[in-house]
Image (cartoon, helix red, strand yellow):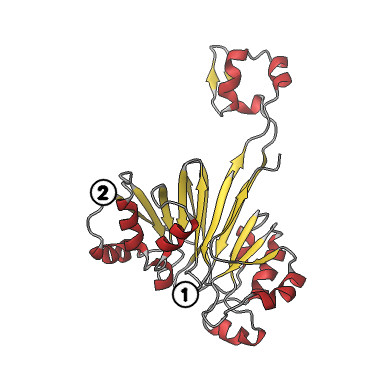
Amino acid sequence: MLDVCLLGCGGMMPLPYRWLTSMMVRYNGMSLLVDCGEGTQIAMKEKGWSPKPIDVICFTHFHADHISGLPGMLLSMGNSDRVEPVKLIGPKGLINVVNSLRSIAPELPFAVECIEIAGNEQDFDIGGLKLHAFKVAHSIPCYGYSVSIDRAGRFDADKARQQGIELKYWNKLQHGETIETGDRVLTPEMVMGPDRKGLKVTYATDSRPTDSIWKNAIDADLFICEGMYGEKDKIDHAKANKHMTFYEAAELAVKAQVKEMWLTHYSPSLTRPDPYMKEVRDIFPGAVAGKDGMSKELCFED
């Protein structure tokens, strides 16, 4: 089970009715945050979710609406009595940016580790979650992220019996262990069926449409994608500023064959996304206009 919340869906600046774009994922007692513009900790408080269990904060890029809330977030985490280390992941330059921002939050009761993404793509393993960073196309270096949980196949008891594998080894094999029994080496593949479908969430914002986005979003259960502009006459503006329209995001969702797409990162001039959604759903029926605090619990298929 994976809990996903779109804490805010605004771009450029927080508004009285809209927080800045940020996504939070909760899994197995830990939390992962993607982007942290100013006021993100307030959006989290309004949702009723706690900053204390955040183990990882990922940044798409270093524009203020995506990272300027970091000092306040770290202080909120410290005030919640967190003492465990926190990992920060982002583009090259992250260490310098974080050190600068921490000049106003210098004393924390936990360590902060910065990891700068190397190259166009990089994989991370975080407490059972798989995190994949991939480069997108913005005016400065910028990355999207896919968060996924793999799911092993079913344990086949009949197969174990047929191979003469003793009952005492079943549990260990089911949990991925390899066992040496003297004259035999027992491996999970001997008793496990094919891998089953896991869970996947892909998040991409501040970018023109790129192959890297739809290829990394393939078969995602949830695709959270920038839709800066709903107005079709803003396409030239979107191209000039390296952003996307609602319709371009929907076309990426079609290519990736995702189950559902939430639009986010609206322009401050876009007060209501709903009037544009019919045409968006004509392209991709599973499109949803994101709203602050929108959340979903993703569960395995069976």
1 or 2: tag closer to the N-terminus = 1
Residue shown at 47%/41% (left/top)?
29
Residue shown at 70%/70% (left/top)?
251
Query: Along the line of sight, which residue is nearer the eye, 277 or 122?
Result: 277
Vertical comparison of 187 with 165: above or below: below
- 78 left or right, relative to 5: left
Residue 146 visible (yes or no): no
Residue 228 visible (yes or no): yes
Q: Which mark is residue 16?
A: 1
The N terminus is located in which quarter? top right
**Which element is circle 1 on?**
loop
Of circles 1 and 2, the one toward us is 1
Q: Amino acid at mark 1?
A: Pro
Q: Quadrant of residue 101?
A: bottom left
Residue shown at 61%/85% (left/top)?
234
The C terminus is located in which quarter? top right
Q: Amino acid at mark 2?
A: Pro
**Residue bearing the label numbered 2:** 109
Where in the figure is residue 118, as x and y percent of width and height?
43, 58
Between the C-alphas of marks 1 and 2, the distance is: 32 Å
- Within 10 angstroms of label 1, few (less than 14), some, or many (20 or more) residues? few
